[in-house]
Image (spheres, rainbow, N blue to C red):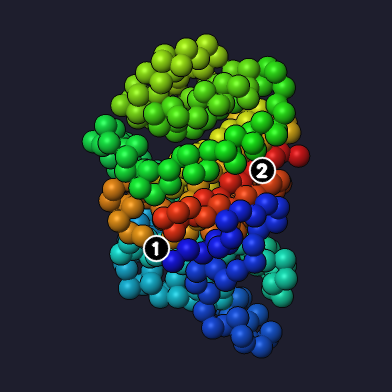
Amino acid sequence: MLDCAPSLATAGPMPSQPSILTHPASVALEGSERLALLYKAAGDSLRLQILRLLRSESLGVLEMCGILDVRQPALSHHLKVLLNATLVSTRREGNAIFYRRVFIAPDDALARQKRAIFAGVDALPLDEAVTARLVTVKQQRERHSREFFARVAGQFRQNQELVAELQQYFGSLRDLLHGLALPAKATVLEVGPGEGNLLALLSQVGGKVIALDNSAEMLSKARATVAAARLRNVELLLGDLATALARGIEADLVIFSMVLHHLASPAEAFSDSARLLKRGGRLLIVDLCRHQQDWVRENCGDLWRGFEPEELSGWAEQAGFEQDQSLFLSLRNGFQVQMRLFHLP
């Protein structure tokens, strides 16, 4: 089952479709009842803490129990209240249910009230202990990802091609990148280059290319690719987005190609990219549409089973991006790839 557009290729606005992100039956209630549910949900300090915690994160129930130091039955009750008020939505990843704040649709009758609640919650600082435990959760996710790539570096490309073979969408990606017409001295930052299969193309698009990866094993393979192709304008950097920020890198284009579903916090990648980009810079996301294939998690180390278009748009908007081009490509094996281009105004 796929949740993005079924067409072979569509450019421009996102397709209109049902989302698998769960919303309860309360959306059919009368306006006064919905408003009452909304304010009831916002009338509890723990529920406000949950909304603050989910500002830019998708978290599982057990993760939130540990972060907030709350027993699961109590947390589940509060999450149900927030779900009924359509302040949060859910998605299943394997055997776990993850929660995040809803992305507020422009036609939502309670959009103004929800935005006011979120704005008020976001003005609250996170408790230091809560922040520390949240960092620990992210580190655990990142460690899982690094350990996976260290273990399967030699066969990762074959595993990845079972899902999305580069050649099936390379032509479209090449045309998109050349169509950007970046300045001759533009800096391109690729996060998670893997074996470096895109670096030759990126070296033609930008004057300088920085390939950033937190896996030493995968970066070694990218280094071999760079040497074999004699790419003179490619710099390899071991680390993550925090490393790039600490080094003061300023980029004209940041690209994540089949990487976002491996990241501990996809939303954070948008906000970090916004800080790395120059004014008018672009962010290109190439990733899977939402799917239901659990075997991909085990074989490819994916933390997330792709993304709904509205998720990427919501995170981009929160980080200050405006939407540019969108392209959706159906692959031969039933998976679907989305290419989403955003820019900083």
Q: Position of residue 205 (x, y in %)?
A: 63, 25
> With 118 as the anchor, is 268 left or right in this view?
left
Tell me if label 1 and label 2 are in contact, CB under 8 Å.
no
Estimate the spatial distance between the alpha carbons at disc 1 and disc 2, rounded to whole Å: 26 Å
Mark 1 residue type: Gln
Residue sticking out furthest to the left: 151
Q: Image quadrant for the N terminus?
A: bottom left
Residue found at x 39% / y 49%? 163
Q: Image quadrant for the C terminus?
A: top right
Q: Is residue 186 visible?
A: yes
Dot 2 lies on which element? strand
Residue found at x 61% / y 76%? 39
Q: Is residue 55 above or below residue 82?
A: above
The residue to which callout 2 is attached is 342
Q: Is residue 99 visible?
A: no
Q: Dot 1 surroundings within 10 Å: few (below 14), some, or many (20 or more)?
A: some
Q: Position of residue 162 (x, y in %)?
A: 35, 47
Name the foreground residue: 235 vs 269.
235
Residue found at x 29% / y 33%? 153
Q: Is residue 229 above or below residue 118?
A: above
Q: Is residue 273 above or below residue 201?
A: below
Q: Position of residue 338 (x, y in %)?
A: 56, 50
Closer to the chain start, of discs 1 and 2, is 1
Mark 2 residue type: Phe
Dot 1 lies on which element? loop
Q: Dot 2 surroundings within 10 Å: few (below 14), some, or many (20 or more)?
A: many
Q: Position of residue 34 (x, y in %)?
A: 63, 82
The residue to which callout 1 is attached is 292
Residue found at x 61% / y 85%? 28
